[in-house]
Amino acid sequence: MAETERYRLKDKPSSKLIYPQPSLLQPARRDVLVLSSWLAPVVWEGTFNIDILNNQFRLQNATIGLTAFALRRHTIYLKQFLTSAEKHFMVGHRVNYYIFTDHPPSVPHIPLHKGRKLTVFQIPGHDLWHDVSMQRMEFLSVYSNQRFHKEVSYLVCADVDISFQHDVGVEILSSLFATLHLSFYMVNRELFHYERRPSSQAYIPEDEGDFYYTGSLFGGSVAEVYRLVEACHQMIIKDKASDIEAVCYDESYLNKYLLYHKPTKILSSEYMFSEKIALERWSKSQLNLFSLIKPVKILDLAKNYTLTRGDFTE
């Protein structure tokens, strides 16, 4: 048998998939935005077939990296983060967990499924909360350039104080993806919490902007993530030299970068949901976000700032 024929047989999906043919007359969702003006899909439950996607990604033989920063008392979230990820994150795919912490002994020993491993990086802590928030851009840049590109194909960057509630799979993966912030979904861009001071590197004028993205979940190919975090890191350095601190810290720089480097996929607020925010918006504007969210894929955990920020200087 010819070498090319053997290769094709090897890569051919092992099972036949049965699913309806796509139809213009039967759109996946009519109640939400499913496509951006630059043709990036907006991912909601019901807009994709995970079996098709899994088959396609298995052909890539890809490993996915998941990063989280757990500094000071934020280590209390690590057990929930890792156990919920083992249950719901990239089920059936190889995963490398990368935990950045100033206290490695606090990282719990969680049984991992086959094809998964955990790597802990010790990094210094900071006295100021916003320095902790922004330093991750620097470390993600350094490790993406020096290590991650050798070990994983995609990098998912998440906050540690979250819980995976339902399966989060390869439907989120793309060259560069970002996640809608629940507080600003269906809000006029003039009200986004962009940095509005022209003196800041994160500045965005009031007449610009597509969406407001959360800094709690973003990612893509390692190369694209490196470009993003390095650009944000350089903006942070320049602002720091001018004694400027962006209004929403690293999230402000993330939004500035994504305004001019459009994400190729956008995750709906199912992928970073807060019951508190949803209830507040419902009471203020009668917008029932609960009706749009089919399953909560990732839950932004209620914060106990007395515990997590008690040893930081505000």
Image (cartoon, grey):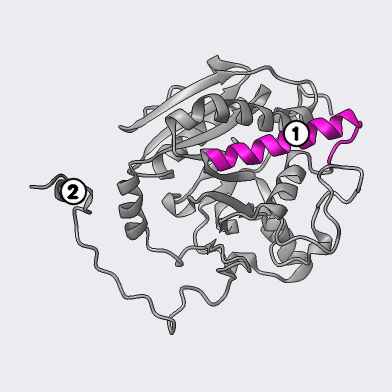
User: What mark, if any, has residue 302 been given in the picture?
Assistant: none
265 magenta-colored: no
Labels 1, 2: front one: 2
| Circle 2 crowding by C-alpha within 10 Å: few under 14, some 14–19, many from 20 | few
Front position in the image: 2 or 155: 2
Q: Indicate left or right for 11 with 159 as reference.
A: left
Magenta segment boundaries in residue numbering? 223-246
- Spatial CA span between label 1 and label 2: 46 Å
235 magenta-colored: yes
| Circle 1 crowding by C-alpha within 10 Å: few under 14, some 14–19, many from 20 | some
Residue at position x 75%, y 43% from top?
A: 253
Front position in the image: 30 or 150: 150
Q: How would you classify the magenta stretch by its main secondary structure?
A: helix
Q: Position of residue 142 (x, y in %)?
A: 61, 26
Q: Which residue position holds label 2?
A: 4
- The correct choice, above or below, for 191 with respect to 307 in the image is below
- The correct choice, above or below, for 288 with respect to 275 in the image is below
Q: Position of residue 225 (x, y in %)?
A: 58, 40
Front position in the image: 291 or 70: 70
Q: Amino acid at mark 2?
A: Thr
Q: Which residue position holds label 1?
A: 234
Q: Position of residue 152 (x, y in %)?
A: 44, 34
Dot 1 or dot 2: first in sequence order is: 2
Instruction: Kindly indicate the quadrant of the structure image that contains residue 78.
Output: top right
Residue at position x 59%, y 70% from top?
A: 33
Residue at position x 19%, y 57% from top?
A: 15
Secondary element at tag 2:
helix
Secondary element at tag 1:
helix
Q: Indicate left or right for 178 with 44 as reference.
A: right
Front position in the image: 80 or 130: 130
Q: Amino acid at mark 1?
A: Gln
